Image (spheres, rainbow, N blue to C red):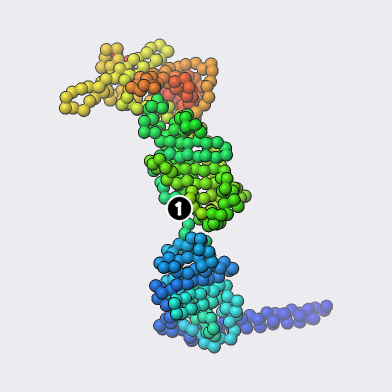
Amino acid sequence: MKRGARLAVLLAALAVLIGAWVLAQTLSGRRETALAEHAHEEPMSLAVGPAEEVNALSWNYFGDAVNLKKDGDIWVNAEDGACPIDSGAVAPLVEAVASASAAGVIEDVTDFDQYGLADPAFAVMAATADKVMTYYIGDSNPAGVWYVRLEGEDKVYLEDGTLAGRFQIGLDDVLALESIDIKPEDVTALSVHSQAGDYSMTKEEDPESIWYTDAFPWFFRDGEGQALYPLDTAKVQTFAGALTDLALTECVSWDAADEADYGLDAPQAEAELYCGENVPAVTVQFGAYDDGDVYVRLGGSALVYKVPGTVLDGFLYPDTEAMRPLNPLALNWDALTGVTLTLPEAAYDVTRTMSAQEGEEPESIYTEGGRSLDPEKVSSWLDQAAALPADSRTGATEGREELFRITFRQDNELYPEVTAVFSGYDSVHRLCTVNGEEYYLVSRVAADAVASNAEAFFKETKE
């Protein structure tokens, strides 16, 4: 093709594009002019009737059809009476059709396509005892005005978006979903029965009857109910929070007869939360996995939800070792009767008694080798020992040189003595062995400070 011919073709194509743009702008201008010409100073009512008289609502939003009717004071699913509807979530929808209004109207419309009303995105039907109205919702313009058509009319109403905005939802948005209204700190026991094994976590009223200190009231119990070891309270509450904070937002069924479809006829696990009573405050059943999710149901409910599968993973295989406390010497000093610090070249044996002055609060009296010790300094040292944190737990390690040991004597039938042996480990840690069965790695600097501070104090007192 010659250069001149090609230029002519390009000019012709450009003319077509310009013509199309001019036409579009002309139509848009006409439409906006029509909107301006038909605007009203006072809003026009599009209400179906007073809110208290609205007894039916249905809408279809991009294929998600919802059909509701009022039964007495509550709203129900007209298609399925078993489907739980949240009447509170329906209230704003009722208010929208009861207060719908238009800022203006365009009369005698023949081309509804320019307003998005030839094939509307969605429609809303509202009814009272003696009136039915169907609203077809079209496009909106940059000013936030929506184009609405009433069934049987050739008019386009200019609606402010209250009506259009409220109904851009589906059935899931008006379901009466359940929730677990329990705070983690209110939980007193957690029990899990699963295909991987049974266990429980319980908060004991008298932890000293099980362990050497009452600082850790939570205990891990096996399937037989045997208390095995204590757990850190904050970590238990975090663990329980996986249930108390469970977001039951994706409901997949409200028919209990479908339980086999979700693996809930034979749950993989059942978790129970107790709040001081002998019966569970809530029971959560875990069914089958579905890709990365798992189906769940609250005990006694017909509603089935989807939640992340990691929630079930955590209850099937809990890392309870990571939940154990890392405060090896958090003892109850009120029960202390004495303490012995044994160093390589010396030992200091302290006895604690209580004063019994009539009409006064009992006070601690500490003596060592016939000498009275400053109770504030002894208490400060005990607090330092109690605050000694472990970086981690470990297993038994043979052949380590013992550097020093502290033996606490206390009023505890099960554990009258608690002995912490500190041994060399590496450049960062000391190995702290409690009662020959609990092993911790503690800071070398912090552990040595506990011993050196006590030794300095005893030497100072002796001088």
The percent coordinates of residue 110 (x first, y second) are 58, 86
> Could you say which is closer to the camera, residue 92 or residue 30?
92
Task: Report helix, strand or loop for mark 1.
Answer: loop
Q: In screen coordinates, is 32 left or right of 340?
A: right
Which residue in the protein does label 1 denote?
179
Residue 251 showing in the rendered view: no
Q: Amino acid at mark 1?
A: Ser
Q: In screen coordinates, is 318 left or right of 385?
A: right
Most extreme residue toward the left is 359
Q: In screen coordinates, is 264 left or right of 462?
A: right
Q: Quadrant of the C terminus?
A: top left
Q: Against 360, is 262 above or below?
A: below
> Could you say which is closer to the camera, residue 395 or residue 32?
395
> Could you say which is closer to the camera, residue 271 or residue 138?
271
The percent coordinates of residue 161 (x first, y second) are 48, 73
The percent coordinates of residue 317 (x first, y second) are 55, 38
Q: Residue at x 57, y 45 (%)?
A: 266
Q: Quadrant of residue 360?
A: top left
Residue 123 showing in the rendered view: yes
Q: Residue at x 35, y 19 (%)?
A: 409
The percent coordinates of residue 324 (x first, y second) are 47, 32
Q: Quadrant of residue 379?
A: top left
